[in-house]
Amino acid sequence: MADYRHQSGPKPTCKAFLLCDDTILEAGTGKISLIGVFRRFGLMRVPGSTRPFHAFIQLTNAQGVYDVVVEVRDLATDDVIAEASGADIEITDRLDVCNIIIPAPPLPIQNEGNYDFIVFANNEEIDRQQFKAIVLTPEEDDDDDN
């Protein structure tokens, strides 16, 4: 088998990118269930923190070893509010689909507005998913995320 560790592979194509409350990997089938897909966080106040969540990313058109890094950026200030690098992923067949689940801890939110969750592979941006942080009114609750 060829060693792809020292080869610069093609930039992966993102086929799916969703933020969700949780993920379940089914034993036996290997199917992934996404629980509570959302596009906003409801907070009691700002500054505040989000709840923990997961990012589900599906890549294709990739071959080689990729250093995956995520960054969360406040679009109002252009500040990076969180950054993490994960383990390298290795994709040996360019036609394969690679599913990546990234657990995210609570994020510090300084203001209401739009944020980008950005994924990089080998220092190249692959894709980004935008979410909104809002302050809930007393009659709203966080279960109404969209």
Image (cartoon, rainbow, N blue to C red):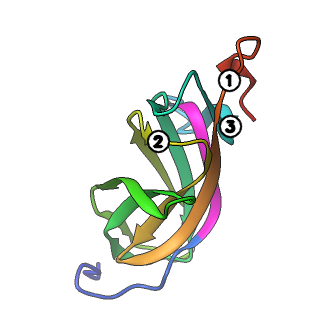
The relative height of residue 14 versus residue 138 in the rendered view (above or below) is below
Magenta stretch: residue 18 in it? yes
In percent of width and height, residue 51 lies at 48, 27
Start-end of magenta stretch: 14-23
Instruction: Specify the amino acid type for callout 3.
Output: Phe
Residue occupying image coordinates x 66% and y 21%: 142
Q: From where the camera sits, is residue 42 visible?
A: yes
Q: Which residue is disc 3 drawn over? A: 38
Expressed as whole percent of the image width and height from the top left, the position of residue 73 reads: 48, 58
Nearest to the observer: residue 62 or residue 120 = 120
Q: Which residue is mark 2?
A: 110
> Would residue 9 be counted in the magenta stretch?
no
Secondary structure of residue under mark 1: loop
Q: Residue at x 66, y 38 (%)?
A: 40
Tell me the number on the disc at residue 136. 1
Q: At label 1, which amino acid type do we have?
A: Leu
From the viewer's side, name the closer residue of 90 and 76: 76
Crowdedness of circle 3 by 10 Å Cα count: few (<14), some, many (20+)? some
Q: How far is mark 3 from mark 2, CA to CA?
A: 20 Å
Tell me which residue sits at (46%, 34%) in the image: 47
